[in-house]
Image (cartoon, rainbow, N blue to C red):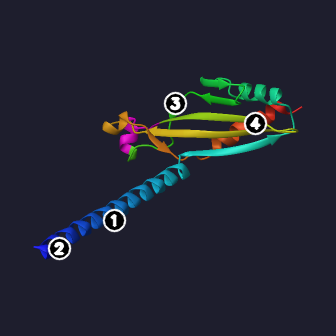
Amino acid sequence: MLKLSLICNVMKIAYFAITASLVLVFSGCFFTSNDQVRKDISKSAFSSKYLKTFQIDYETLWSAAIIALDGMPLEKIDKEKGLIKSGWLEGWSQKNARSALTRRFLDESWKERYSLTVKISQNNTFCTVVVSCRTQERPRGGSAAYRWQRLQSTGEREEEFLMHIDDILAP
């Protein structure tokens, strides 16, 4: 009887030890995989960043950025934080239909849209502009036509924006 009781207690302890170690192992895998997913998402956030430093005051650079965004819908303007977010601008993508026949008769072009985020920061003697672009596209027909798919920005729009600021600030 004593041996049976002792064996039952040992088995209970072993059961709890195994259960606890499995919980720790699986929770460790879960947290590790979530951290890895977060790192992967932050690395590939589908936006590219470009920056340029200017030897001018904040007010002048802020005005130049607003002028450079002329014609774009502005979603958020926060001068204290130095943040400007544009709304989405839509157009046609360079990507076309599968064949010349469908391109000619069905007009199966892809839509594309993009949004710019401009961050202006000030240091003692200079100001910095950081530009990032979010780009999305969707095909013309089918169920995919209702979903925008994120793309990696080519950097052309960011460079164009920074060159436009250069042109505005040129004497």
Q: CA distance from mark 4 to mark 3?
A: 29 Å
Q: Between 33 and 78, which is closer to the camera in this rendering?
A: 33
Which residue position holds label 2? 7
Which residue position holds label 4? 121
Mark 4: which amino acid? Ser
Residues in magenta, as a range: 101-111
Q: CA distance from mark 2 to mark 3?
A: 73 Å
Residue at the location (67% across, 30% down)? Answer: 83
Q: Is residue 149 left or right of residue 53?
A: left
Mark 1: which amino acid? Ser
Which residue position holds label 3? 90
Where residue 151 appears, x then y in whole percent?
A: 50, 45
Mark 3: which amino acid? Glu
**Residue 104 falls within the magenta-colored stretch:** yes
Badge 2 crowding class, 10 Å Cα cut-off, few under 14, some 14 to 19, many 20 or more, is few
Q: Residue furthest left?
A: 1
Q: Is residue 72 visible?
A: no
**Residue 11 falls within the magenta-colored stretch:** no
Going from N to C along the chain, the mark reached first, 4 or 3, is 3
Residue at the location (38% across, 47% down)? Answer: 99
- 3 vs 1, front mark: 1
Q: Between 82 and 153, which is closer to the camera in this rendering?
A: 82
Q: Is disc 4 in contact with disc 3, using a CB cutoff of under 8 Å?
A: no
- 1 vs 4, front mark: 1
Question: What secondary structure is marked by label 3?
Answer: strand
Which residue position holds label 1? 21
Going from N to C along the chain, the mark reached first, 2 or 3, is 2
Q: Is residue 123 left or right of residue 51?
A: right
Quadrant assignment, res 169: top right
Q: Is residue 119 left or right of residue 10?
A: right
Mark 2: which amino acid? Ile
